[in-house]
Image (tube, helix red, strand yellow):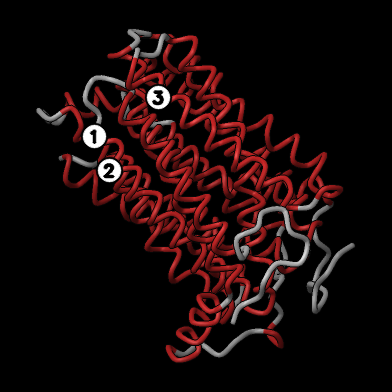
Amino acid sequence: MIETSAAPARPMPKFGEFVAMMAALMALTALSVDIMLPALPQIREDFGIVDANAQQLVITAYIMGFALGQLFHGPLSDGIGRRAVLLGGLAAYTLASVACFVSGSFEVLLLARVIQGLANAAPRIVAVAVVRDIYGGRRMAEVMSFVMMIFIVAPVIAPSLGGLFLLLGSWHLIFVFLAVLGAVSLAWTGLRLPETRPAATREPMSLGWVMRAFGQAIAERQTLGYTLATGIVFGSLMGYINSAQQIYMEVYGLGALFPIVFGACAAALAIASFVNTRFVGRLGMRRVSHAALLGFVASGVVHAAVAATMGVPLWLFLGLLSISLFCFGLMMPNFNALAMEPMGRIAGTASSFVGAVTTGLGAGLGLWIGQAYDGTVVPLTVGFAGLGVAGLLVVLLTEGGRLFRVNPPRAR
């Protein structure tokens, strides 16, 4: 059932196209990150970078820009409408991708990546806000699961795409591809997506209102708690993405098989999203996500213990990592939906708050894990275990000490 305060000026796309469109907008971020992984050694070599861990900055620069941009796009979309912010962001993303292509130094590339992230925050924020404009409650969680299921295909195929572009030429071709995707997304949404934030429901654009809206998000126990939990657990995924190329190439010597193995593990996220669409409507967001959180902690602790004491053969590393990623895939859409659920009136600004905090916190924690890489998988596995436990503690505090409860405590 559609839940919206006012019907859009023109019909929404049919459900399938709407889900595909929202997934495509969010997939731009996954592609912008994971497609770079095979190219990192070549970028480092081309720019004469000595420190191998410095190549991770190509990922982190984008993510930090992405986190910062989310603070602004949400309030803008609440004040001037979703379409203007979305189309402006996609146009800027396309231009920033061109700037990455022509960059002549590592510093210029990093700056262009920051701008690329700043711009691409708009589609991510607007996609979540549009879903919240139209849907609420468990139905919103179901829609987000469909979106995530399609979205997760991106990191599965992205490294292979990056590797293909390296075979055809160099890492520069990756940014040509991203620029084309940005332009196509701009045309698609510009022609097909109506405004879901009518002028009559928009909020006044003032610093005072924005601060009050952020304050409202912070004061809401459910929103703040699940935002922090999402950011903490997201840090483990960012740590994995930052160090994946080095782990698979240096620790396990996979060579050309790296994109295939990386994609096979990422498939666990897609499977989890599909499973979530089947069960969240019947079981509810808390039951599914809390069970997944416990599984994430258990797999992380076992993985860290094995890595620290006896070493992890490739088959066991992939098995335990896939379990962790499967649990992660069950948590993320539900944690995000739980954070956004009380924020219907200020969905854009709330999406900014949730997105900026989760992305910024995740990027910082992920960089810490990635920079701790020492030629073994121990830093990564310890990071998964530690952040899993920290996320569990935050959820327990948010839920008043009890998991799976039907009527959670509200803000006080």
Q: Residue 275, relative to residue 67: is it above or below?
A: above
Disc 1 and disc 3 in contact, CB within 8 angstroms = no
Q: Which of the two residues, 175 or 291, is positioned nearer the viewer here?
A: 291
Q: Position of residue 215 (x, y in %)?
A: 49, 82
Label 2, secondary structure: give it. helix
Q: Residue 368's mark?
A: 2
Disc 1 and disc 2 in contact, CB within 8 angstroms = yes
Q: Amino acid at mark 3?
A: Ala
Q: Which of the two residues, 321 or 131, is positioned nearer the viewer here?
A: 321
Q: Which of the two residues, 396 or 41, is positioned nearer the viewer here?
A: 396
Taking the spot 61% from the left edge, 52% from the top edge, the residue there is 187
Q: Furthest-right residue in view?
A: 1
Q: Amino acid at mark 2?
A: Trp
- Alpha carbons under labels 3 and 2: distance apart: 20 Å
Q: Nearer the viewer, mark 3 or mark 2?
A: 3
> Within the image, what quadrant is residue 71 found in?
bottom left
Q: Amino acid at mark 1?
A: Ala
Q: Residue 30's mark?
A: none
Q: Residues within 10 Å of mark 1 (few under 14, many from 20)?
A: some
- Alpha carbons under labels 1 and 2: distance apart: 6 Å
Which residue position is annotated with label 3? 305
Taking the spot 86% from the left edge, 48% from the top edge, the residue there is 282
> Within the image, what quadrant is residue 125 found in?
bottom right
Which residue position is annotated with label 1? 372
Quadrant where the image shows the C terminus? bottom right
Q: Furthest-front residue in view?
A: 401
N-terminal of the two: label 3 or label 2? 3
Q: Position of residue 19 (x, y in %)?
A: 74, 48
